[in-house]
Amino acid sequence: MQSAIQATDNTKTAGAVKAGDGKYIFPMSQLAGIDAGIGYSTAFGPVVEGERMQVALVTKAKGTGAKPHTHPNEQWNYIVQGTLRVQVGDQPEQLCGPGTLLYFPANIVHSTVATQDGDVVFLAVKDLSHGIHGSPVDGKMEKGFFDPGFEK
């Protein structure tokens, strides 16, 4: 069943759905997904933007994820399924599973990669000072991160 809610042009992120103006309930599993980390991440899922916040239900396939990147807006990720290898700033990399809430301050280098055990699903929340996409630290807008053997 497809949702009648469509992406709009008045969003910061192309393909996102705009909330408000009579649209308040969003069946996330029925919304069209977008590439949520173009050029640096394999993140994919629907994005809904409100007046000041944006929310995405993101999936990263096992063995893939985001190479080190930053964005000018702060971000929260709540892991629903799977395990992420997470590095924030100069902190050591950690394994984080379901029920873990991650915080990424604005402009701090971070990366998240789904372990090879399975796909990861997380709810991402960002302020709308910027769209959903960030910028890779290496400056190369090519593709996301892939563990050896997990490239497409």
Image: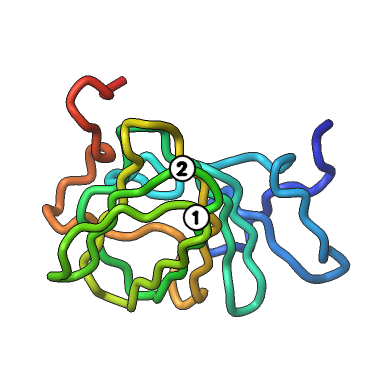
Which residue is under mark 2?
82
Q: Residues within 10 Å of mark 2 (few under 14, many from 20)?
A: many
Position above or below: 62 against 136: above
What residue sits 23% from the left and 60% below the top?
Answer: 87
Q: Secondary structure at mark 1?
A: strand
Which residue is under mark 1?
79
The location of residue 40, given as percent across then percent down, is 27, 46
**In the image shown, does 126 or 4 lie closer to the viewer?**
126
Q: Amino acid at mark 2?
A: Gly
The location of residue 34, given as percent across then percent down, is 53, 42
The location of residue 31, given as percent across then percent down, is 70, 43
What residue sits 43% from the left and 40% below the top?
Answer: 60
How many badges with numbers are in the image?
2
**In the image shown, does 147 or 106 lie closer to the viewer?**
147
Q: Which mark is residue 8?
A: none
Q: Amino acid at mark 1?
A: Ile
Quadrant in which residue 43 is drawn: top left
Quarter of the image that includes the N terminus: top right
Left or right, residue 38 beside residue 1: left
What residue sits 15% from the left and 58% below the top?
Answer: 137
Q: Are marks 2 and 1 in contact (CB under 8 Å)?
A: yes
